[in-house]
Amino acid sequence: MNGKTLLVAVAIALAAGVAAWWWWADDERAIRKQLAVIEEAAAKVENEPPVEGLVKATQLAALFSDPCRLTVEAARHEGTYTRKQIQERIVLVRASFVQVAVTLHDTVIERIEDKNAAVRGTIRLRGKATGDPIADVQEFKAKMAKIDGKWLFTAVTVIEVLER
Amino acid sequence: MKQSRWRRFLLPDLNRSFALRLVLVAVAAAVVFTQVLIPFRIQGKSMEPTYRDGGFNFCWRARYLFAEPERGDVVAIRFAGQRIMLLKRIVGLAGDTVEFRNGALFVNDTWVKEPHLRSPSDWNLAARRVEPGKVYVVGDNRIVPLDRQSMGQVERARIVGGVLW
């Protein structure tokens, strides 16, 4: 093997490495972009126009696969819901708040392989209903799948950190 | 002219030695304040009056390196990571039975005096046994209705450390 061949081999290996990294990074970027939608679309300001609320609920529901498995460990609840059912529930929950802010923290994409990913993080909600301010923090884990080019939640579990 | 000690401290020469010292201090500070003493701001009233909403403290991670958590300890409990943590008081250890009767805490059927509490409470919670590998934690603010208080048994592994003061 002469010097020129070696150089070409190294260049190809390098290009393959960069491409692999780019693909991986691209998926991670896409997943994080979807997670950012949760913060944006869940947020509600006082006197939010109803149409805007509906648009945001639709945006949030579009993050879930149809159907999607939802588990709430603390409530011992597990069920499979259609996107429409999820959207209706989101509309109801958002309507119960006068103002709300949702933030995600410590979000880790645990693995991405073969159009499937596992995500874990902490979700924090601070809001105001009719009375006192409301604050809640929950840990979640989720399974995501790349469906028609979009990363969607296929299963979401709200983890019970404190078991009463 | 020889520079004074203070002048050299406040306005050091930007040489290699200074750059090295700066890097060492920055690395040491990053390690200490992310791994050993994690600064945090208290948000919420669940630990009032012991820890006020808006207060500042440090999570001392070495607290349980060579010792096990005890009843009465105030601990930081992590969720998925360490950006958001819960501050709670341990009232029961693995194997203990925890119960509230008209606001009074009973551990293993014995009334526990809690001098740190200031607010009256009407909590009633049936006795429950703390599972192995877990501790039972509660906030100090018992004026909050029971159903709105984050409390319960939590895995020992989720305890990040104790509070510094």
Image (spheres, rainbow, N blue to C red):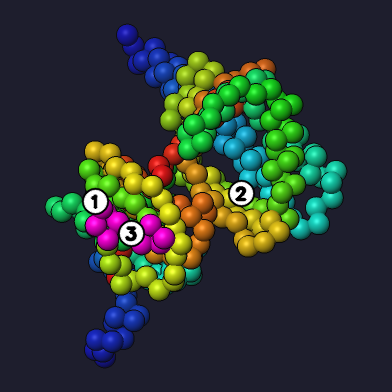
State left or right for residue A100 relative to residue B134.
right
**Residue A75 locus on image (x, y percent):** 51, 36
Q: Chain of mark 2?
A: A
Q: Is residue A92 above or below residue B87?
A: above
Q: Amino acid at mark 3?
A: Leu
Q: Residue at x 38, y 57 (%)?
A: B101
Q: Residue furthest top?
A: A1
Residue A61: x and y in percent read: 70, 32
Nearest to the observer: residue B163 or residue B11: B163
Q: CA distance from mark 2 to mark 3?
A: 34 Å
Name the kind of residue labelled 2 in the image.
Answer: Val
Please name the amino acid that badge 1 sits on.
Asn
Q: Select label 2 or label 1 by which is in front.
A: 1
Q: Are marks 2 and 3 in contact (CB under 8 Å)?
A: no
Q: Position of residue B2 (x, y in %)?
A: 24, 89
Disc 2: which residue: A102
Q: Quadrant of residue B130?
A: top left
Residue visible at 41% across and 50% down?
B125
